[in-house]
Amino acid sequence: MAVFERIVGSLSKYAYWVAGACVVAMMAIVVANILTRKLWIPIYQTYDFVGFISAVMVSFSIAYVGIVKGHVAVDMVMERFPQRAQVIISAFGGILSLGMFSIVAWQCAIYANEMRLSGEVSMTAAVPFYPYVYGISLGTALLCLVILTDLIKDIVKAVKR
Amino acid sequence: MSPSTIGIIGIVLLVILFLLRIPVAYVMLLIGFVGFAYVSSLGSAVSILGKEFWGVFSSYSLSVLPMFVFMGTIAFHSGISGRIYDVAYKFVGHYRGGLALATNIACAAFGAMCGSTIAGAAAMGKVTLPEMERYHYDKSLATGCVAAAGSLAILIPPSGILIIYGILVEESIGRLFAAGILPGILLTFLFAITIFVLCRLKPELAPAGSKTSWKERLASTTGVIEMALLFVFVMGGLFIGWFTPTEAGAAGAAGALVISLARRGLSWQGFAAAIGETVRISAMVYLIVAGATVFGRFMAVSRIPFELSEFVGGLGIAPGIIMGLIIFGYLIGGCFMDALAMITLTVPILHGVILNLGFDSVWFGVMIVLVVEMGAITPPVGINVYTIKGVAPDVPLGTIFRGIFPFLIAIVVCAALLVIFPQIVLYLPSIIKY
């Protein structure tokens, strides 16, 4: 379990660094477009590139944000429950979340495949969409692993008590 | 069961799951998906997931958020808050309660770089609370004023909440930002009056500082002048149509980065932390918006927003009273729930009702921000209060909440003025281009 958790943690952290690079890249390309538009000609593909970079940034960061419990949740009521009830409810939430994001990861993969087969590309850059949609599938799959890790920990805790 | 009954059951389940500490984004996604599948079909519910996630994650219009967040986090880590405070103190520090007045003004100025109430309270709290402690300020006044004034960051543009609102209701971000300026100045002024009156009534709360010469005052402005110019450039560029909102945010982030590096105010650790925080906040918001989009699809097929709109319109009650009830509902909800969650959940349902009653969408956005500000400083959630508690761990929570009460009255007065004189909100949006 510890090895599995370490692997998931490392993968999420590497993905998070990629997401960080995307923030800087997004700023750079938008500013470059502003400057070149004034001085010479605009970078017409900016709109497309910002969309692609944004997709990578978000999908590669949601897993790590899940690890650091950065996704907003309402604490107030659960804090008043006994520890055991908290663990059981948390496991119940984990099962629901795992099921939901597994469907999202699966559906994004299907959607990416459809885009690949149809040869759909962006309007100005003429870049295929599908690699980025596969990226979303990968990011949500990584989030599933994070949720699974927490779920296993909750089950172990509930059984031990 | 009719679709609207299923919709109501969905909303009740959503609230129950929220309370079970399942992340808000996950719950909205889950209930939206299951509800949509129940009302339409499993096949169509499954097929929208890939499209909706791709649509939200790759949205150009949403990219305005990470850019403005990046600008704010760079400002946070570059130490600008200390310089802003120094300038404000040199100008108003000689009045009784001058440090509190300076805190209020500095929070407003910092809000012009940063769109997060937590960052506003944390950045200014770190700088101002030790100073106020040194001059034996009443702890209640000191902490209450930072917690309240820190919330100005979400009213004065750029504002994270206004960005999310604008995206949810497809309103121009530029107009929303412009709409926040005058109410932001008004609220800063009302906070200042509150401090002034408190210090008049109880002079022992805060001493007066020493007076500084005009030469010293003007010299201190060199520490913030470039950031002030950057704000004028970014917001001015947005309002006159030079920039799209995303471009304004990117230009602001790049400008803040260049200024911070030139001043040697940003370390590598600070830069990395700024990026990390930007990614974390963006991921959290994007996932909530994706969940809210799927939930919105469910609401649309359940016809709840339309039926609610028709129902409220048929009640024959004055729109002002209905608006008062809605704001009251937000205020109560804001005491228990995270602002972002509350807005993404309620705005898609209520926005149609608001327009049907004849209220302006931009005006409503600013009113929501004001109510969220109240939620940020009222118990039991009161996120700003906990932020200040983190900065000043020795001050009991009760002392901070007691200090906040007078400022809460100021926000209520501000809200009332905006209801009576909606022009305060709507004048600037009416004259800008974008």
Image: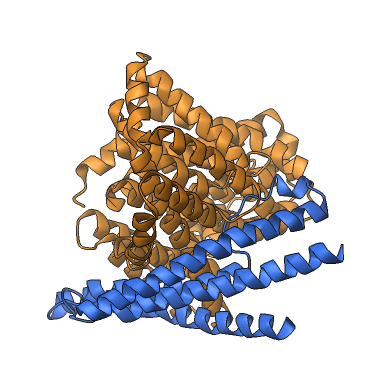
Residue at x 29% of width, y 28% of height: B356
From the viewer's perspective, is A50 left or right of B139? left
State whether residue B173 is above or below residue B261.
Answer: above
Please, which residue is most extreme toward the left here?
Answer: A41
Frontmost residue, A153 versus B116? A153
Is residue A70 visible from the viewing direction of this image?
yes
Residue A157: percent from left, percent from top: 80, 66
Residue drawn at (35%, 47%) of the image: B40
Q: Position of residue A12 (x, y in %)?
A: 56, 79
Which residue extends farthest right? A161
Number of callouts in the render?
Answer: 0
- Residue B398: image quadrant is top right
Q: Nearer the viewer, residue B56 or B224?
A: B56
Q: Is residue B383 left or right of residue B360?
A: right
- Locate the N terminus of chain B by quadrant: top left
Chain A, colour shown: blue
Nearer the observer, A74 or A140: A140
Q: Residue A151's spot in the image, x, y percent?
A: 68, 67
Q: Residue at x 38, y 55 (%)?
A: B45
